[in-house]
Image: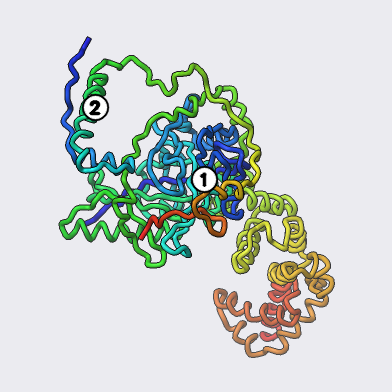
Amino acid sequence: MNWEVVIGLEVHLQLATESKIFSGAATRFGAEPNTQACAVDLAMPGMLPVLNEQAVRYAVMFGLGIGAEIGLRSVFDRKNYFYPDLPKGYQISQFQEPIVGRGHFDIQLEDGSVRRIGITRAHLEEDAGKSLHEDFHDQTGIDLNRAGTPLLEIVSEPDLRSAEEAVAYLKTLHSLVTSLGISDGNMAEGSMRCDINLSLRPAGSETLGTRAEIKNVNSFRFVEKAIHHEVERQADILESGGKVVQETRLYDADRDETRSMRSKEVANDYRYFPEPDLLPVVIEQSWVDSIRASLPELPAARRERFIADYGLGAYDATVLAAERPLAEFYEAVAKGCGDAKIAANWVQVELLGQLNRNDLQLSESPVHAPALAVLLQRILDGSISGKIGKQVFEAMWAGEGDADSIIEARGLRQVSDSSALRAMVAEVIRDNPEQVQQYLAADEGRRKKLSGFFVGQIMKLSRGQANPQMVSNLLNEQLADAGKNGDT
Amino acid sequence: MLTVVKVMTVHQDDIEKLAELARVRIPAEEAAEVTARIATILGLVDQLQSVDTAAVEPMANPLDAVQRLRADAVTEANQREAFQAIAPAVENGLYLVPKVIE
C-alpha cells in the first residue's frame, strides 16, 4: 500500500523575556534550582498573575511575521491537570481566543521547491517546572525555575508530508523567530520543543487517518528519526489489518523508538475555563501598527534582497539569509571586498566549514568580517591566487595576523612579473621534452588536458605563487613556439 | 419559571473518572450519594443549557475592565531559603515529592 504521511507540528517556543510571563522572577537558563521561582511561580495562596507586556509584544511580532490576524482581544484560560512540576494544578494558557490567528509561511526543500505551510494559531502560555526522577530514592526532585517562563505555542495545519518537510518547517521557523529576536531558539536548552502529530492515509484519500502524538522532541535530527520510526510503526499496524490508536507517545532517542505513555500520564481532559485571575487582554491596533513598523528584516525578504541585489542563486541566498548574524557577516564581507559572489563562496565554504569542523558558533569565529574582506580583496586584485588565499585564511584562523602581514611574512605574493614567469615556463618546457612532444602531437581537445600538466609543474616551481592567467598565456605562447621550432 | 430539575443519567464510573481527574477519593459507601447529588447539579446545568444564548457574547470576566500589562523587569529576588524552610522535603535545592513515574 502506498501511504501518504500527514504531519502537523506544535512548537513550544520560549520567549526571550527577562522576567516570567506572570511574575517578576528571572528566566535565565541554568540558574541554581529554585532560585528563580517566586511566590507566584510556587502558587502560594493569594498570589495573582500580572501579564508581561514584552511577552504580548513578542507574540504580536510573531503573528505579524507570519501574516496572521492579531487577536486584539484575547483571553487566558485554565488548563487543568495535576503534576508536581505544575504547582497551581493548572496551566494558564489560551484556548478559545488566542492572540495569534491563522497565518502561514513558506518552506524551501532541498530540490529548491517551495511549499506554503499554514499556521492554525499561536497562543501564549506559561511553561511548567522540571521533574528530576533520577538520584532521589523513591522521590522526584522538582525545580520550578522554568515554571512561568513565557511560551508561545505555535500550531501548524496538517500540511507537512514528510520528515524532510517537517525539518524544513522547523528550520524556517527557527530562522524566523531568531531573526525577530523573540527567542534564542536554543533547542539544546529547551527553548524550542516540538510535538509531532502524525497519521497515515492511503495515497489519494481526502480523509485523515487516526493520528498519534509524539511529545517533546527536541532536536531537528530527533524529529526526523521520530517521524521515520512512527511512519513505519503505523504502516505496519495498518498493513496487518490493525487500527492506529489515538494516543500520546514519547520518542526515546537512546533506543530510537516511540513508545506509548501510560494512560495515567495522559488524562486528556483539561476542563478549560476562563482564568478568573486575569482580565481579557485588549490591545490597540495602533500598538500593533507601531510594532509592525519596527519589525526587523525577515529571512524571506532578506533572501529575495540577496538574490536581487547580489545576484546570488536561490540556494546560496537561502543559506546566507536564514540567520541574522550570518547574513550581517556576509553583507559586511561582500561590501568590504566589493564582490558579492566570491564573498558568498568564501563565507559558505571556508568560514562555515571551519566553524563546523571546530564546532564553533559564528560569534566565536577568530576571523571577523572586515579581515576576511581584506583577504578577498587580495585575491581580487591579483596579489594572491585563490589557492594561496586558502592558506592565508588558515593562517588567519590560527591567529597569525591579518591577510597582508601573513602574505608579507610568508612571501606569498603572486608572481606577476612576466620575465620571471617566462623563465619558469621555459624551464618546465625544457625539462619535459616527452610531454612537449605528446602535446604537439595531440589534437585540440587533448591539448587542453595536457597543458594542465605544464601549469601544474609551473605552479609547483613557483610554490603556487605564479599568476595563473599569465602562466596560461605564456605557456600557450611558448608551446606554440616549440611547435614551430620542431617543424623547422 | 421552570422548577422541575431533570435528573441526568450519571453512572458511577463517570463519578470515578471525575474523582480521578480531581484527585479526590470518594469512599465506596458515599459513591451512590455523590452520584445522585452530581446528577442533580448536572440537571441544573442541563436546564441552563436549554436557554438560547446564540446572540450572547461569551463572558470571560464579569468586570468591565481589561488586563493591565507590566513592564518586563526582574523584580523578584531569590528567596529559596525562606520558601524551602516550609517545604516538607528538600534536597540540593530541589523540592522532593513522592515519585511520579515508575
Question: What mark, if any, has residue A147 been given in the picture?
Answer: 1
Between A124 and B102, the residue placed more toward the observer is: B102
Report the coloring of the rendering.
rainbow
Query: Residue visible at 73% across and 52% down?
Result: A338
Mark yes or no: residue A350 visible.
yes
Q: Chain of mark 2?
A: B
Q: Which residue is mark 2?
A: B42
Residue A419 image-quadrant placement: bottom right
Q: Quadrant of the N terminus of chain A?
A: bottom left
**Residues marked 2 and 1, same chain:** no
Q: Tell me the element at label 1.
A: loop
A24 vs A461: above or below? above
Q: Report the side of B60 relative to A34 (left or right).
A: left
A2 vs A461: above or below? above
Q: Tell me the element at label 2.
A: helix
Q: Position of residue B25 (x, y in %)?
A: 29, 43
Q: Residues within 10 Å of mark 1 (few under 14, many from 20)?
A: many
Q: Report the side of A295 relative to B21 (left or right).
A: right
Question: What mark, if any, has residue B12 been given in the picture?
Answer: none
Mark yes or no: residue A385 visible.
no
- Tags 2 and 1 in contact by the CB under 8 Å rule? no
B59 vs A318: above or below? above
Q: Residues within 10 Å of mark 2 (few under 14, many from 20)?
A: some
Q: Quadrant of the C terminus of chain A?
A: bottom right
Q: Chain of mark 1?
A: A
Q: Give the amino acid type for the residue marked by disc 2 in the picture.
A: Leu
Q: Position of residue A70 (x, y in %)?
A: 49, 29
Q: Give the amino acid type for the residue marked by disc 1 in the picture.
A: Ala
